[in-house]
Amino acid sequence: MQIPWRTAPRAALSSPLTLLVSLVTALLLSFVVAAAVMHSAASGSAAIDYQQDQLCAEALHPSLEAADVPHEYVAKGVQEITAAVTDKPPLIGTYTREKRVDFGGMPTVAKFGYRPGATDHLKVLQGGSKDGLWVPQSIAVTTDLRLGERGMGGRLPPVTAVYADVLDPLPAWWCSERHFVVPNVLDRDELATAVVWMPSAESFAALPPEAAGPTDITVRFPAEAPRTVDEAAALLAEGTARIRPIEDMFNRKVSPLVLPVENARQTARNVRSAVLPLTLISLLIGLAGVATVTVQWAQRRQQELRLLWVRGSGPFALGGRGVLELGLPLVIGGAAGLGTARLLLPVYAPSEIVPPGTGSTAALAVLVAVVLSISVTFATGALRTHRMFQVAQRGNRLRKVLTALPWELATAALAVWAWNRVQNSGLATTTKIGGLPRIDAAALAFPLLVVLTAALLTARLARWALAASHRARFWSKPAAQLAVRRLAAAAGPVTGVLLVGVLAVGTIAVGTAIAGSQKTALEVKSGMYTGTNSYAQIKPETTELPEALRGDSTIVGYVELHGRTALVVDPKTFRDGAFPFEIDPALLNEPLRVGTAPRREVRLPGLPPVNPSAWVPTFPKLGRSGWVVPVDRIEDRDDVGSWYVWTRKPLGELTGALSTAGVKFRNVGEKSKAVQGLPFLTIRWTFGFVTALGAVLAVVAAIALLLAVEVRRRQNALSGAFSTRMGLGPAAMLRSHLLELGALTGAAVVVGLSASAVSSAFTVPELDPAPRLLPAPEVPNALPLLVTTVVGSALVVLVAAWIAVRAVRSARIGELIRG
Amino acid sequence: MVEHVLRLREVGVEYRTPAGAVTAVSGVTLDVPASGMTVLAGPSGSGKSTLLRVLSLVERPTTGGVELRGMGTARLSSRARRKLRRREIALVFQNPGDNLIGHLDVGDNLRAAAQAAGRVARVEELLEQLGLPGTATWKVSAMSGGQQQRLAFGCALARQATVVLADEPTSQLDAASADLVLETLADLARRGVPVVAASHDPRLIALAHTRFDLRNGALAA
């Protein structure tokens, strides 16, 4: 290798600024590519994590249940299961049905059960020795049972503990056993009972025949909660294989993990396909940045390149010279970008956990990006030198063609096409229950295409305006005139910074708006769907709220017949417990017709004939159709379908307060688990990534602005020094630079925010993963973003203006003129 | 033996500008002898530098043809022209700094020039000839303009080019430095290396064995 090529890496040190810019460009480019890979992979993990919150972690997969097994076969059955499944010990629960049992006091109903470790997960109220019966408090109180007593004429083991009845929300260990351990206290035949726990499998097998009878068996396989899609899929496959020898013994086989795995995969696919176009656009912008750096390198090295050219080197050799000088910073920047993407994963991705292999995929993507960067450097270097020396007199036709092409029309056409997709199939619904809608990546690109079109249009208009700016005459305001002239003199960098600035502000605003709208939509839709934050069904005779719930809760009756629904509300407390919504409180004192409910008299069980004149468009729980009746119009509460306590408190506080007050309850639920949130989260995660990319672009725009000022430091210093000597005051000089940079940044902020506001306003209501639930997503309050953007931009402008003014003040004019 | 190292036949060069085509050189026919110093003389804007770029095969003429050692170059591909430049031609620019690679030391500049032509430089011997002994490890920036320009001719020597072309080689130098360069040029010519220089410096013109005067892009009568 000849000397100028061999020494090129060392020669790079002669321009630290170029090195730094190359390195940062490659870093940002690689960060975007690696972050896209990691973000999509992490979205699968986040989907698994989210669904685990919705699932019972104790029995993810598989879950087996056998009903009505003759008691005498239970021990044998358990042995067979244990013998067949050797790789992972199953957790087997056995439960008798409710039977009349004599504990010596008042006769009661009880069911007996045995589940290894059960006594470790109960709250002991009395006693605690594990070699006897553990009796629930409800039975102990009813029968006045004491420790040491033996039921059924001494044929049962002695009572060694009294435990607190297991209530909702259940601890994780019990979540799969709700059906067996939480009695249906609202059952009117009064047979419902909690479980009396036997001390061992042998004692359970030895239950007296009159206490035993048909037995239910549950087989669970507790496992470490999977953190990634791959782990979940592996768990699913292992579990399915494990139960194959015994599955015929069971009449119920549940695999709660099947759909979540499928959903998580779909989520990762959705996010990947949604971020892919944006990543490709960012990759192109990044490669354009690499090309710009190479062009600047070629300009700086023009003298050396011309010498090598004259000595017979061709464009490829000179392109290679560029690669040898700029390649190392590109490689180092690429590695740094990969590292930064991994390091910042918790900041931008929905989960910190990525499946194994993601790092390698990201590294491969970065490798491709670096190779592309190096190829672009080579091609740009070769083309630039070819144009500078070989076809110098022919002019830059390619540039002219590229500039003349109406790119904004192309992106506008794409935006129209994407809008069509948004309206027609943006979020195609799925036919599978619990499945996810397909997210149309092209539809999600609509707001970004609007921003891109606005950015390109602004850049073109700015270029035209700057070309025509020599007609402007503001000499009465020299600061403004000088600002305009400086802008016009640097038309290329100015339009570049403006383009990237608009893109940055626009993508941040679009990302924030859409991600925020989905977050709020999920929250509000869930609230309107359940009607409240937490609820529990109670008996009709419960008319008073426990003291602990007053002020945050209400009692609501629910009636449903043939798809027609009505709520019975207490006008005094309804707004305390219901999910916040706007309504004139006086309206609650009269029957109400909601939304599309027919305008005629309606008769529903337990309600008087209802023919309301008052109407509201929507109502919690009822949504867009139904009736609301004040509780004082009800004659017999028993005739109303069901009664609930609605509260704004968490579910645990609700059940705790009800238990403390001795109020029997069942069928509990809460807002956070009511609605499948993954479709919302998919869009939120996608646009979260858009925001992250916007932040990267903002960094690029800020650095580009500061570099543009720094690069023309000498020119600024010379013109500034002359202007100062001609009488321009320091304040006017500062004002001039602030005007120049402020106009540029201000234009980027105004256009970016406007474009994002328009596109978000159109897009947000259309991106509704659950259109049947009210209300439609709305654009969130943009004020915080506006303030942040303006403050951030102002800071960049102040720093850039300070750099420019400092250059003028520290300039030695004699040296500048000589140089 | 070829009597002329370079021959121009009816060479014309035009540039396209927004205002229309501008003729820089028109109808120039001349023969550059295979030894001695040839000077293209003329005032600024007369077309000397353009003609020199055409002679050095850096620029293709719009019309006419160039022969190098009897070989026509008009139909040669860019690659073939580059090969000729690599082996046969050394071009020295007006600005001393433009002729050297700033981040290389003096010795490496000579070596790089020789390598480009596929030759090996005898650095110390060359520096001795140039009157710059012991400067092989110097940085280029440590040399004066005159020394740099002499080193540029040293690079041309290192390349063992068939012909050395120099564009206004003394115009950026003070009188003392210019003297050193003129001395180098005269020395080259004495060794039989054909040198073509474009200049309006009377002292350089005085050294010419052959002289062509240019006026407004054409040879003066």
Image: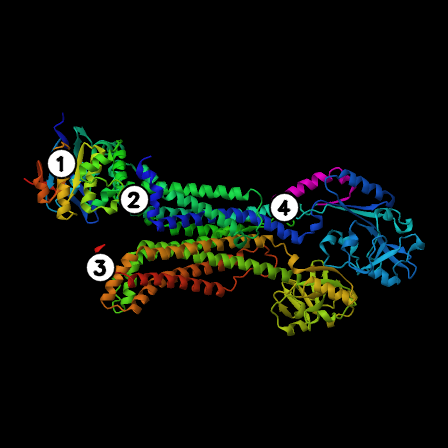
Left or right: B152 with respect to A221? left
What is the span of residues highlighted in magenta in the rendered image? A228-254
Instruction: Relative to A296, say whether A508 is above or below.
Output: below
Whether A401 is among the magenta residues is no
Q: Answer yes or no: is residue B57 visible.
A: no
Residue receiving disc 4: A261
Instruction: Relative to A721, say whether B209 is above or below.
Output: above
Outermost residue to the front: B134
Q: Nearer the viewer, residue A89 or A793?
A: A89
Disc 4 sits on a residue from what chain?
A
Q: Amino acid at mark 1?
A: Asp
Q: Position of residue A40 (x, y in %)?
A: 54, 48
Task: Bin the neighbour count of mark 2 within 10 Å (Cα to Cα): few under 14, some 14-19, many 20 and up.
Answer: many
Residue receiving disc 2: B103
Using the image, tell me which numbered label, if any, was put on residue B187. Answer: 1
* Circle 2 SS class: loop
Q: Quadrant of the N terminus of chain A?
A: top left
Residue receiving disc 3: A814
Callouts 4 and 3 on one subunit: yes
Outermost residue to the bottom: A586
Disc 2 sits on a residue from what chain?
B
